[in-house]
Amino acid sequence: MQAILEVKNLRFRYRPDEELIEDLSFEVKRGEFFGILGPNGAGKSTLLKLVLGFLKPQGGQIRLFGKPLEEFREWKKIGYVPQRFSVERAFTGSVGELLRAVAPKEKVGWVIAFLHLESLLRRPFNQLSGGEQQKVLLAMALTTNPELLLLDEPMTGLDVHAQAHIEEVLKELSKDRAVIVVSHDIGFVLRNARRILCLGMPFCKVIEPGEFEGILRDLYRLH
Ligand SMILES: Nc1ncnc2c1ncn2[C@@H]1O[C@H](COP(=O)(O)OP(=O)(O)OP(=O)(O)O)[C@@H](O)[C@H]1O
Ligand SMILES: [Mg+2]
């Protein structure tokens, strides 16, 4: 089966003297829940931005749905929830209006039901709590029914019920698409991901959940 995302020999640095991502290679296939773990500053958010073409790598290749990133145009196939997101403060519209701004009404119905957002629809987005906003952002990313979901810390700010709900939602979604999740919630990643990219060690590598204990100390420098 063709990989949805292929990353080969990727190299990236923000500053000339500081390599952040060195020779990183991995691929993610359809039906996969792919976790990304690593300490603060390891480059996890940066990696997602590279995949989205927001940043340009200094070396290596990224392919999306078989196409080189430079030629890829079908951005509706990709849903992204950034780590930090701010809707213009001046935006006083409701959740319903925000969702309809990204997709026609008939396309957002399933997302509203899927994420149980009915009670929030009429509320102004800028008056929601952090966790409620987080769910709406996930809904916005889902409205195009994307085949690849990139989520940067989707659990942050969610209470235990919301976390359990979103975990179920992501598990369900990953069955027939690819879900890539950056998270500091190690338990959540180990429970769900079949493969995990560990970023931030001298040699970043893809492991299976069972191998995590062996590299935990190296990854988070717990010496
Ligand atoms: N625009 C930027 N210009 C220069 N340096 C940056 C920029 N964005 C991030 N960095 C640096 O690059 C490194 C990686 O940042 P990144 O946000 O990818 O880390 P992260 O793994 O997502 O961390 P966290 O777990 O804290 O979210 C950090 O040292 C950060 O300070
Ligand atoms: Mg980050």
Image (cartoon, helix red, strand yellow):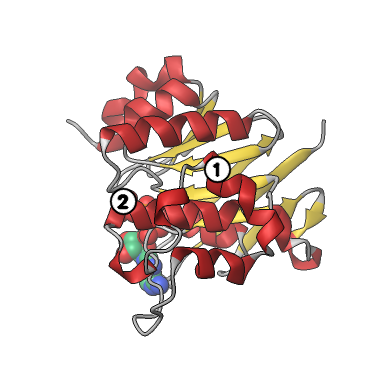
Residue at 24 percent across and 36 percent down: it is: 221
Name, please, the residue furthest toward the left.
223
The number of callouts visible is 2
Few, some or many C-alpha atoms within 10 Å of disc 1 (few <14, some 14-19, many ≥20)?
Answer: few
Comparing labels 1 and 2, the label whose residue is closer to the camera: 1
Residue at 63 percent across and 55 percent down: it is: 108
> Along the horizontal axis of the image, is 87 left or right of 113?
left
Q: Earlier in the sequence, mark 1 or mark 2?
A: 1
Q: Is residue 177 visible?
A: yes
Can you tell me which quadrant of the image ligand 1 is in?
bottom left
Q: Which residue is mark 1?
A: 113
> Along the horizontal axis of the image, is 51 left or right of 201?
right
Task: Give percent across and percent down for residue 191.
Answer: 42, 21
> Along the horizontal axis of the image, is 65 left or right of 169?
right
Task: Give percent across and percent down for residue 84.
Answer: 37, 63
Query: 65 or 58: which is nearer to us?
Result: 65
Query: 83 or 211: which is nearer to us?
Result: 83
Few, some or many C-alpha atoms within 10 Å of disc 2 (few <14, some 14-19, many ≥20)?
Answer: some
**Up-down relation of residue 165 to residue 124 (above or below):** above
**Up-down relation of residue 174 to residue 120 (above or below):** above
- Mark 2 element type: helix
